[in-house]
Image (cartoon, helix red, strand yellow):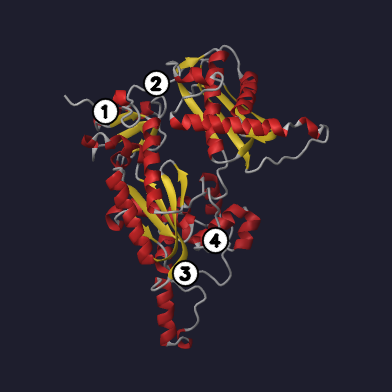
Amino acid sequence: MPPLPLAGGGADSAGGLAYNAPMLTDITEKEVQSEEERLLGRGQRYARVYLLTDCNNFFVSCERLFRPDLEDRPVLVLSNNDGCVVARSQEVRDLGVPMGVAVFKIRELIERHHIVCFSSNFNLYLDISQRIMRTLETLCEEVEIYSVDEAFLVLHDVSEEEAEEMAFKVRKTIACHIGVPVSVGVATSKTLAKLASHHAKQHLSETGGVYAVLNEVKRERLLRDNPVSEVWGVGRKLRERLNELQIETAYALSRCDLKKMRRLFSIVLVNTIRELNGEDVIEEGGTEGQAQIMWSRSFKERITALSDLEVALSSFTSEAAVRLRALKRYCRRVTVYLRTSLYGEGPHYAAEDTVLLDVPVADTRVLTQAALKILRRLYKPGFRYMKAGVILTDFTARRTFQGDLFRDSGEVDLKRLEEGDALMALLDKLNARERGTVYLGLAGAYAGDKRFTHKKQLSRAYTTSFEELPVLM
């Protein structure tokens, strides 16, 4: 078993706070008291503090807003075509239902425990999310939206008491104005704030939905109590590699030598270690920004015709492009995959391919053209396709690219690319007012085609459609 790459000075095997603690006989009573004050953070003010606001079971909470009879009852939200689980209430978690499981595998459990199921209502969830984010912006001048149900509030020059007071205010305001429960993690780095919000959510009765780790005592306790898999950015493969090095807790990871870890892994993990130790080194937008955008769907009916697959993939690419532009990024690599069902009789087929664009773009037209080109290469007649998807990767914040030795650089029409960016900005602005106002090409045919979507248990559009408002008799 490889040795743990600890930082110099030795590990504190006794579980105390000292790292290279001198002998007690060398420390005066005043110095002991001063060290205790430092560890507990008494009287200290912090230059920058992050409040990670995370909605609890967000999709389920949105459904319960208009169905108060579902409080304390097991609730599931299903994927686009009711195929698998995408959100669970705590009651469902307690029954042992994993995320992403196929619905047919838990059908007996659903019936036995009278679990209420909803088709995913993304229009509703997005509208509730926007209301939450607008509310947060009334409470704090600096808000960084991380996802549909998470946002960082940035405070400056505050004490631990002031930061906690603001965190409880955020929680109460969202509950009062919107009705969605949230958990708030408070720390000097985003990675610690994420871990603290997770702790607040998992120990709701003890924390009241808020957990601050601004002092050393609570920071170390949090790291010791969480496996390394709970650290932001540590996925399954990275967790397995870390476990091979006997790094099994967040605390063990925080104690690792940075130079050794840089040689073994990457600068991303090094920054994560620094963040676990309270350093603020992650820029706005995530650990290193989002690495990919994937948009895929299972079809209600099996698709056999290439033309139908083109309609679906055009819609998927359009949605992925909107997300790409929201991140203010350009993309150079497009991947498409296509497959039949993994179950049942009949021939099975799965394929995937990638194309590298000459110039990084965020133009839906260019990305769709690339995706359809790949699809036509992958498609084989005679199969009943049940799922397709597009993946955008290789992001850049600027349209910089390496020229081709065998191509004239003048062939790249930068003015036309800039005009395309302006067109996409206008398109996004129109669709921001009302979703689905303008479609490009084949993408518009997907939304109204019942062969692609299957949502038998879709809740009403309570907040975005007058026609679907409840009627009081």
Residue where numbered disc 1 is placed: 111
- Residue at image position (38%, 35%) is 127
- Residue kind at label 1, given as amino acid type: Glu
Instruction: Sort mark 3 into few (<14), some (14-19) or many (20+) by Cα contacts within 10 Å.
Output: few
Quick check: marks 3 and 1 in contact, CB under 8 Å?
Answer: no
Residue 336 visible? The answer is yes
Q: Nearer the viewer, mark 4 or mark 3?
A: 4
Instruction: Sort mark 1 into few (<14), some (14-19) or many (20+) by Cα contacts within 10 Å.
Output: few
- Residue kind at label 3, given as amino acid type: Ser
Q: Nearer the viewer, mark 3 or mark 2?
A: 2
Instruction: Give the quadrant of the C terminus.
Output: top left
Residue where numbered disc 4 is placed: 274
- Residue at image position (62%, 54%) is 267
Determine whether the residue tagged by mark 1 lies in a helix, strand or loop.
Answer: helix
Determine whether the residue tagged by mark 2 lies in a helix, strand or loop.
Answer: loop
Residue where numbered disc 2 is placed: 454
Left or right: residue 418 versus residue 234 is right
Instruction: Sort mark 4 into few (<14), some (14-19) or many (20+) by Cα contacts within 10 Å.
Output: many
Residue 320 visible? The answer is no
Instruction: Give the quadrant of the N terminus.
Output: bottom right
Residue where numbered disc 3 is placed: 13
Along the viewing direction, whichever of 12 and 379 lies nearer the viewer: 379
